[in-house]
Image (cartoon, rainbow, N blue to C red):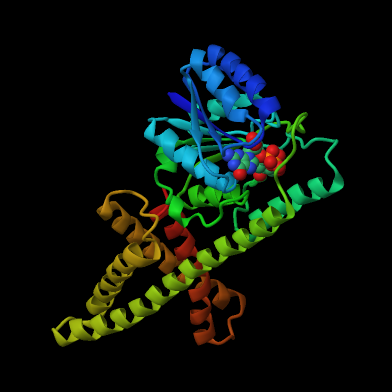
Amino acid sequence: MKVIIVLPTYNERENIGPMLHALEQVRAELKHELQVLVVDDNSPDGTQGIVKAAMETSPWIHLMTGQKQGLGAAYIRGMSEAMAMHADVIFEMDCDFSHDPEDIPRLLHEIERGADFVIGSRYVSGGRIPDEWKLWRKANSFFGNIVARMVAGIYPVRDCTAGFRAIRTSMLSQVDFDSIKTQGYGFQVSLLHACYVLGARVREVPVIFTDRAYGESKLGLKDIIEFIQNAFAIRLRGMERFIKFGAVGLSGVVVNLFFFWLFQTWGAEPYLASPLAIEVSIIWNFLLNNLWTFSESKGDSRFIVRGLKFNVVSLMSLLVSYGTFLSLNAMFPDGNQYLYQASGIIPASVFNYFCNLYWTFGK
Ligand code: GDD
């Protein structure tokens, strides 16, 4: 495997030399090819000069320069370049030794075991944030993760804001970077969310985050506000998709009833017209969802496979709806049958939406 570490730097004069040296040692012991792409935003402190000097003797070090637009913007440029360099796995990592280069093989090991997206996590058993972090930084990290998990909707992941991650290029190449609306620290959440929605197999490996010894964090209040806005924007986009899905479902009801009538006018008995009309409406819903609701995340590249999966989910949703109807009847036999019939629609729609989101149109 070809592994490229994208290393963003801004004013890292004290850290960049020792970091490249540490990576050289990891490289020597790694069974995979390892290269480093430093993405420096014209740091005024001379970071680039140190990188250029190292490049003279180390052809595995590369440098990309640009104007400072934020951490996320630097990562998007760096990752695009790393993909063009035919990386199989791309790492995100800080240059200030917050992330221990010696943890790289552990993250890679999870990729070898089949993961698409591996997080060096501070919030799983064995992981840690620095004891010396001030209360505001601890609170910022803690609440940042709560916001990411609850608002952006990445519930199962414990460390959504981590900046130490290994991602398969096959996963990254499916991400529409134009859909990532933040250029700052919210990028971590946006990218994770994009991969998560695409069905990435996400794993968390415990790491101990160490506070930087030199230089300072670039994370400011403006970044925190942007981070929260970004999490809400992700959630709203998710709702937009759910609303589209609902609209398609409603149009499917009209199609269903129309074809139920049409097949009967063509001479079909109602018991045959009914399943035929249901199938037509399922196909109709699939085509619209494929074209519109999930246009960004197409899942399996074979159209027919997506169509079959959609069909399976739709039929299972019927069972969920029917199961709800039967359960309510069993629990409250004297209740209103129409209410029970309508009650089935809610769990069936939620089931239908999430199965299609993660299975049919996810990876
Ligand atoms: N090129 C470039 N441009 N690099 C940047 C920029 C930028 O605008 N801003 C920061 N960097 C580089 C830094 O030089 C460092 O190598 C790395 O990105 C992380 O920046 P820090 O400013 O040190 O981040 P932090 O310690 O506050 O935040 C870390 O932890 C967060 C979670 O607690 C990072 O790993 C974040 O990604 C992470 O969300």
Quadrant containing the N terminus in the rendered view: top left
Would residue 153 be found to the left or right of residue 178 on screen? right
Q: Position of residue 277 (x, y in %)?
A: 26, 76
> Does residue 323 appear in the picture of this structure?
no
Q: Is residue 318 above or below residue 206?
A: below
Q: Position of residue 218 (x, y in %)?
A: 70, 44
- Point out the residue furthest to the left here: 266
At horizontal 49% and vertical 47% (from top left) the residue drawn is 195
Foreground residue, 317 or 95?
A: 95
Q: Is residue 263 above or below residue 85?
A: below
> Does residue 350 appear in the picture of this structure?
yes
At horizontal 43% and vertical 36% (from top left) the residue drawn is 81
Foreground residue, 307 or 169?
A: 169
Q: Is residue 83 above or below residue 219?
A: above
Would residue 201 be found to the left or right of residue 23 on screen? left
Q: Position of residue 193 (x, y in %)?
A: 54, 52
Foreground residue, 347 or 124?
A: 124
**Quarter of the picture for ligand 1?**
top right
Foreground residue, 15 or 92?
A: 15
At horizontal 63% and vertical 62% (from top left) the residue drawn is 229
Q: Is residue 188 above or below residue 78?
A: below
Image-quadrant location for residue 214: top right
Number of residue marks? 0
At horizontal 23% and vertical 86% (from top left) the residue drawn is 261
